[in-house]
Image: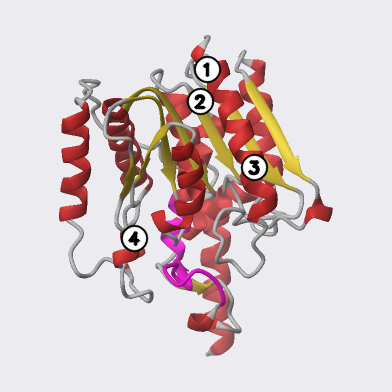
Amino acid sequence: MALGTLGVASFVLAALWILSDRLPPVARPAVSHEFPSYAAAMALIDSLRAHDDAQINPMCHPRVLTGGARSDRVLVVFHGFTNCPKQFDLLAEAFSRIGYNVFMPRLPGHGMADRMSEDLRTLTAEDLVQAGESAVEIAHGLGDHVTIMGLSSGAVLAAWLARNRTDIDCVVLIAPSFAPHGVPEPAARRLTSILRGLPNFFLWWDPRSRENVLGPKQAYPRYASHALAEVYRLGFEVIERPDLGRLAAKVVLITSAADEAVNNDLAFELVRRWRSRGADVRTFEFPAVQGVRHDMIDPEQPYERTRVTYPVIEHLTVEGERRGFHR
């Protein structure tokens, strides 16, 4: 019976592998481009908070840092996979001190008070896109020049916005999660399709520690296979269709040679494709000797190196944004 079951499973996986060469396109929601006033933008953020009921971790509500009025510069921050806006608190405060209004939305399925929540089961690329588009609309009410920053899955969303919108000055991609570490593009695309086709299941970030994994207490210790596949699907939408026109935004890509989680080569390939179409893209990689791992943002990670990463991210963002002002 076991051999028979194994044979069936092998056949199914082989069939999925053969049929999994393409991924369905990501549908874009209707965009109004009717930007709110500052007061209306703040009201929209208040509304987002009001919809966060007791099931949401109090540490994970959407955040906004402003000086009480529109500013010249606005930063929108997308947190990483299974984390929440709290991840960026300290870095956001640094940008606030130098004059930015900062908006940190909570992405769909994230930030539940129950860290074993299954809300990520239903996350789709379209959900991420909808959240990203809404965040940019709100940002235009907070100030004149919009910069988008994202980590990991948040960076994938930021890359999608860079490709699809012309009203963003600068996009900062921090360790974008286009594919797993060590998995090349063709295999990663097929893996994405297979994960979407198989029944949804959860995987531990650390199978030994499970729910007791060290690190940020607001982050989930596990993730849904379909949700991860949807992040990769969104990434392949960007990588495989980079030719929708010249990017309006200036792009900054920040990676680490010690990143154990993602395939940096795919990020570099996207840069190559964008540059070949005339895009202004700057790159920076932390050398492996500095020990900067994938989550280079959250100060609660046991391996955090924020004294190394924060000054670099701030400098490159400001530099990239100023280039964007003069396009």
Q: CA distance from mark 3 to mark 2?
A: 18 Å
Q: Are marks 1 and 4 in contact (CB under 8 Å)?
A: no
Residue 224 on the magenta segment: yes
Looking at the rendered structure, which numbered label has been put on residue 324?
1
Q: Amino acid at mark 4?
A: Cys
Q: Residue at x 57, y 32 (%)?
A: 317
Residue 173 on the magenta segment: no
Q: Amino acid at mark 3?
A: Pro
Q: Nearer the viewer, residue 11 or 289?
A: 289
Disc 4 crowd, CA 10 A, few/some/many (<14, 14-19, 20+) = many
Counting residues from the start of the chain, the first of labels 2 and 1 encountered is 2
Q: CA distance from mark 3 to mark 4?
A: 25 Å
Residue 61 position within the rendered picture, expressed as x and y whole percent measured from the top left: 29, 57
Q: CA distance from mark 1 to mark 4?
A: 31 Å
Residue matched to label 2: 170
Residue 242 position within the rendered picture, expressed as x and y whole percent measured from the top left: 54, 25
Q: Residue at x 18, y 64 (%)?
A: 53
Q: Are marks 2 and 1 in contact (CB under 8 Å)?
A: yes
Residue matched to label 4: 60
- Judged from this view, the residue extending furthest toward the bottom is 1
